[in-house]
């Protein structure tokens, strides 16, 4: 079983407005409302891959009920802690080949709700081998909350795939409990090291991933957008090239990549398969308008075009 954690999920609402103008009444041609949040996107892609997956986190109010219903309708297992505050909404306006997002900060988690989650969490870990932690921390949780979850997972020998950014990522990297895998992008690596992450300077990139801050993290997956990825597994580095495709929407492609990596690691396959599975899922998500969605019928076609080179 793979357990996904989304501490700050949302109802993702997408409005298609072909000709968007400020300070005017807008009429949208299409609207989509789906269960969202980074970890929920991971969950949906894992489910589409046929992986055994369960989602957890915090849900509250009418929006929380709506999100849970959406997962149940899709036959996705879930076990969330109920909170008194309302689950957030995230709005995306798709216009002129651009996307404008309005993101609510989310609910306030009370100390008793946080403790309820920590108390229930070991029961969830007992039935899983892989754990994904994705996205931001909602208000009310301490910066050390992810560290607590990673520590509990390590006590159960559960591999942790961590995907967040900014100060949340720094807080995890500076703590004693180490995730099994992290998936920052090149800009986030540059912010940590204070240097541009440029594969034209390959030796410097390798040195950047060998700094003490990344010690004992088995997998470092550095997203490079259309340029593929640069990956370190233990002491081996890989350069990953991906095919050129027509991108419908890049939103959620990182979450889909995490789903592919989690599923491959769950199956204990070779590095080459882990990397190609993750990258394939990320690409498939960019080919869809709906976030957290892939079309598995194109999996083999994309998979065969990905190149992994040991460097």
Image (spheres, helix red, strand yellow):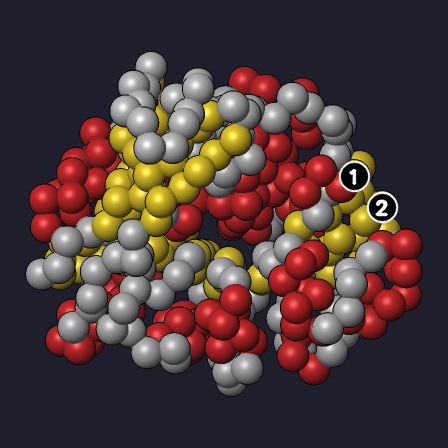
Q: Residue at x 21, y 41 (%)?
A: 67
Residue 192 position within the rendered picture, expressed as x and y whole percent measured from the top left? 66, 72
Quarter location, residue 17? top left
Can residue 184 be seen?
A: yes
Quarter location, residue 40? top left
Q: Of circles 2 and 1, which is in front?
A: 1
Residue 305 position within the rendered picture, expressed as x and y whole percent measured from the top left? 76, 27
Quarter location, residue 27? top left
Residue identified by numbered label 1: 241
Q: Quadrant of the C terminus?
A: bottom right
Q: Which residue is drawn at 90% across and 60% down?
A: 201
Quick one: which residue is furthest to the top in this view? Answer: 29
Q: Which residue is drawn at 27% across and 41% down?
A: 11
- Mark 2 to mark 1: distance in Å? 8 Å
Tell me which numbered mark, 2 or 1, is placed earlier along the sequence: 1
Residue identified by numbered label 2: 309
SS under mark 1: strand
- Within 10 Å of disc 2 (Cα), the crowding (few <14, some 14-19, many 20+) is few
Q: Which residue is drawn at 44% across and 19% down?
A: 19
Contact flag, marks 2 and 1 (Cβ < 8 Å)? yes
Residue 78 position within the rendered picture, expressed as x and y whole percent measured from the top left? 24, 47
């Amino acid at each position: 079983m793979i357990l996904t954690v989304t501490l700050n999920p949302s109802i993702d609402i997408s409005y298609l407005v072909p000709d968007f103008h400020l300070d005017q009444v807008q009429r949208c041609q299409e609207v989509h409302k789906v269960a969202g949040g980074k970890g929920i996107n991971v969950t949906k892609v894992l489910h589409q891959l046929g992986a055994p997956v369960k989602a957890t986190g915090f849900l509250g109010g009418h929006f929380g009920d709506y999100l849970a219903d959406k997962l149940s309708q899709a036959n996705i297992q879930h076990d969330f802690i109920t909170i008194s505050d309302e689950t957030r909404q995230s709005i995306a306006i798709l216009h002129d080949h651009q996307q404008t997002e309005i993101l609510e900060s989310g609910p306030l988690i009370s100390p008793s709700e946080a403790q309820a989650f920590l108390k229930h969490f070991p029961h969830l870990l007992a039935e899983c081998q892989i754990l994904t932690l994705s996205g931001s921390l909602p208000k009310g949780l301490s910066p050390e909350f992810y560290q607590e979850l990673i520590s509990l997972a390590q006590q159960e020998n559960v591999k942790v795939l961590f995907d967040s950014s900014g100060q949340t990522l720094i807080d995890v990297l500076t703590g004693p409990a180490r995730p099994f895998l992290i998936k920052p992008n090149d800009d986030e690596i540059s912010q940590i090291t204070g240097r541009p992450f440029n594969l034209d300077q390959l030796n410097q990139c390798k040195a950047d991933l060998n700094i003490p801050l990344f010690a004992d993290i088995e997998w470092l997956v550095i997203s490079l957008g259309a340029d593929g990825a640069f990956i370190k597994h233990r002491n081996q580095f890989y350069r990953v090239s991906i095919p050129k495709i027509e991108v419908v929407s890049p939103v959620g492609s990182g979450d889909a990549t995490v789903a592919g990596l989690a599923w491959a690691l769950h199956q204990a396959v070779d590095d080459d398969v882990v990397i190609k599975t993750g990258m394939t899922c990320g690409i498939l998500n960019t080919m869809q308008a709906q976030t957290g969605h892939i079309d598995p019928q194109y999996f083999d076609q994309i998979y065969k075009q990905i190149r992994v080179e040991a460097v």
